[in-house]
Image: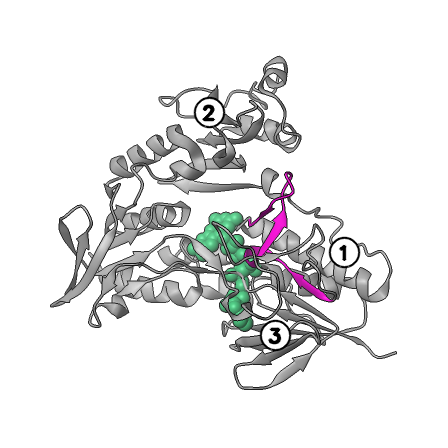
C-alpha cells in the first residue's frame, strides 16, 4: 500500500506538535513540514522574555524531540497558494506538492501600526513575533543603551516586553488607545492595577492615545501622539495584537471567520476544516468552537500544542479509519476554559476562562492592596466566565470546573471554592 502523504504548513507550536504526534503513533507516513522561518521549531513564548533579555540563547529555545527520522522539513520556505479540492500547495519557488491530508498551522502575524511612517524611520519601526524580530529589537535597544523605546499597545506582549526592556536599562514609553491597559481582556480592576504597576516600575505610561506619525530626526525618531505631544525615541515597537496568517488562503475555498475578528480558519472540535475532507487547521490560525458553539481563537502556546496533537489524531483516524491514541492524553482546550499566565513587572497573573465575557467582577480573595488577590467574572445571567489571580493567587485554579460548566454565582457562594488551597497564600 502506498504511504499516505501528510503536509504540514507552519513549523511553529501547532505544526511541530502535530508532526511529533504523527511520528509517535508509529504509523508509516510520508510527512513534509514546510515553515517560512529558517529555523528549527522553537519556543516562541520566549522571544519577548528570556531571548530578548539575553537570559537564554537561540539554541536553548529550540524545541526538543523534533528529530523525527524520515520526516522532511523544508524550512525558510513560504507556501503561497492552496487548492483544497486536490490538496495541492504551491511554494514561493513555483514548486507544487500534493498530499492526502494538509494541516494549516501558519499562526498569526502582528497588526501593523496605522501611523504615517517616513522612509527614513521605517527600519526602526519594529514588530515582535519571531526570534529574528527579537534580534533586531535587541540590537537597537539593549545592545545600544540607554535607548528610548516607544511601545504601541499595552496588551500582554506590550506589557511583558516593556518590563524586560526597562529591566535591561532602556527608557520605556508605553502607549495604548484605551484609558486603562487590558481592560477589555481582564476587566476594570486588574486594568487599574496594571496601570499602577507600570508607573510604579518606571514605565512612562500614556493611555488613551495612539501614535499618528513617526519621522526620522537625525539619529532618533520623532514620534507624534494623537494627544498632541511628541517624543524622541530610538525605536518604536508595534504591539497591537495579531491577525491569523491566512491572507494567502483568501479565495482558495478555505472557510475563514468573518466579523469583528476575521481571518481564522473555521474548524470543528477535531480540527477538521469545515466542509472540506483531508484539510485540518490548528493553533493561532484556527477558530475552534467554544462552549457556546461560536468559533474563537485562543492564541496561547499550550492550546496550539494541544490542537496540533488533536489534528494529528484526526488525520490518522480519517486516513486509516482506526481510533488513535495520539492526542488523547491532551484533550482539546475549549476557548472558554483555556488558562495562561503572564508576569507584570515580576508579579504573576493567572488567567482562566474568558474574563472578557463578564459584565460583573467580584473579589474572591484579598483586595487591590493585598499582595495576592483574585477576581471572578460573571455574565449577564450571573454565571462565571473567568477568573484572574494576581501574585500567585492559586485560589483561581479551584474555579476551573465551575468555569467549564458556567456555574451560577449562587452555586459558587455555597461551595468552598473561594477558600485558598494548600495553606496560606
Ligand atoms: C512575543 C510573544 C510572546 C508570547 N508569549 C506567550 C506566553 O507567555 N504564553 C502563551 O501561552 N503564549 C504566548 N504567545 C503566543 C504563542 O506563542 C502562540 O499562541 C503560539 O506560538 C501559536 O502557535 P502556532 O503554531 O499557531 O503559530 P506559530 O508558533 O506562530 O507558528 C506558525 C509558523 O508558520 C509559519 N508560516 C506562516 N505563514 C506561512 C506560510 N504561508 N508558509 C509557511 N510557513 C508559514 C510562521 O513563520 C511560523 O513559523 C506569545 C507570542 C508572542 C509573539
In the displayed image of the protein, which residue is found farthest to the left?
218
Quarter of the figure that contains the N terminus: bottom right
Q: Which residue is mark 1?
A: 326
Residue at (46, 57) in percent of width and height: 243
Q: CA distance from mark 3 to mark 1?
A: 27 Å
Q: Secondary structure at mark 1?
A: loop
Q: Secondary structure at mark 3?
A: strand
| Camera sees residue 42 | no
Q: Which residue is mark 2?
A: 361
Give the x, y percent position of residue 328. Answer: 76, 50
Image-based side of 214 in relation to 113, left or right: left
Give the x, y percent position of residue 25. Answer: 78, 62
Whichever of callouts 3 and 1 sits on the residue coming sooner in the sequence is 3
Q: Which mark is residue 82?
A: 3
Give the x, y percent position of residue 371. Answer: 39, 25
| Camera sees residue 342 | yes
Q: Which image quadrant for residue 131?
A: bottom left
Q: CA distance from mark 1 to mark 2?
A: 39 Å
Image-based side of 386 in relation to 110, left or right: right
- Please tell me whether residue 54 is drawn above or below residue 160 in the rendered image: below
Amino acid at each position: 500500500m502506498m504511504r499516505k502523504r501528510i503536509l504540514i504548513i507552519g513549523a511553529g507550536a501547532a505544526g511541530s506538535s502535530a508532526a511529533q504526534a504523527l511520528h509517535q503513533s508509529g504509523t508509516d507516513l510520508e510527512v513534509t513540514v514546510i515553515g517560512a522561518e529558517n529555523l528549527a521549531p522553537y519556543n516562541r513564548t520566549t522571544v519577548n522574555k528570556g531571548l530578548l533579555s539575553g537570559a537564554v540563547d537561540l539554541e536553548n529555545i529550540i524545541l526538543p524531540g523534533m528529530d523525527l527520522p524520515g520526516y522532511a522539513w523544508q524550512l525558510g520556505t513560504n507556501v503561497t497558494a492552496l487548492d483544497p479540492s486536490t490538496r495541492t500547495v504551491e511554494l514561493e519557488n513555483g514548486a507544487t506538492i500534493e498530499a492526502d491530508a494538509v494541516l494549516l498551522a501558519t499562526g498569526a502575524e502582528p497588526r501593523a501600526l496605522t501611523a504615517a511612517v517616513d522612509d527614513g524611520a521605517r527600519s526602526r519601526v519594529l514588530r515582535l513575533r519571531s526570534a529574528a524580530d527579537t534580534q533586531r529589537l535587541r540590537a537597537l535597544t539593549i545592545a545600544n543603551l540607554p535607548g528610548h523605546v516607544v511601545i504601541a499597545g499595552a496588551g500582554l506582549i506590550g506589557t511583558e516586553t516593556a518590563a524586560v526592556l526597562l529591566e535591561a536599562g532602556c527608557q520605556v514609553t508605553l502607549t495604548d488607545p484605551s484609558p486603562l491597559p487590558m481592560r477589555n481582556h481582564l476587566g476594570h480592576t486588574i486594568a487599574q492595577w496594571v496601570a499602577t504597576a507600570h508607573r510604579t516600575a518606571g514605565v512612562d505610561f500614556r493611555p488613551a492615545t495612539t501614535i499618528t506619525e513617526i519621522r526620522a530626526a537625525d539619529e532618533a525618531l520623532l514620534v507624534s501622539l494623537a494627544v498632541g505631544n511628541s517624543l524622541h525615541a530610538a525605536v518604536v515597537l508595534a504591539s497591537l495584537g495579531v491577525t491569523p496568517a491566512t491572507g494567502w488562503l483568501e479565495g482558495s475555498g478555505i472557510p475563514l471567520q468573518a466579523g469583528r475578528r476575521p481571518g481564522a480558519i473555521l474548524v470543528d472540535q477535531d480540527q477538521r476544516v469545515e466542509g472540506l475532507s483531508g484539510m485540518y487547521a490548528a493553533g493561532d490560525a484556527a477558530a475552534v468552537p467554544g462552549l457556546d458553539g461560536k468559533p474563537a481563537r485562543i492564541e496561547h502556546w499550550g492550546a496550539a500544542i494541544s490542537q496540533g496533537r488533536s489534528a494529528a489524531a484526526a488525520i490518522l483516524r480519517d486516513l486509516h479509519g482506526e481510533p488513535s491514541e495520539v492526542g488523547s492524553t491532551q484533550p482539546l482546550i475549549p476557548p472558554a476554559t483555556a488558562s495562561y499566565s503572564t508576569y507584570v513587572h515580576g508579579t504573576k497573573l493567572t488567567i482562566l476562562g474568558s474574563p472578557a465575557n463578564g459584565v460583573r467582577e467580584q473579589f474572591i480573595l484579598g483586595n487591590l492592596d493585598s499582595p495576592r488577590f483574585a477576581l471572578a467574572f460573571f455574565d449577564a445571567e450571573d454565571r462565571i466566565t473567568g477568573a484572574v489571580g494576581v501574585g500567585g493567587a492559586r485560589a483561581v485554579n479551584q474555579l476551573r470546573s465551575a468555569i467549564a460548566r458556567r456555574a451560577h454565582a449562587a452555586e459558587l457562594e455555597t461551595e468552598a471554592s473561594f477558600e485558598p488551597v494548600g495553606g496560606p497564600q
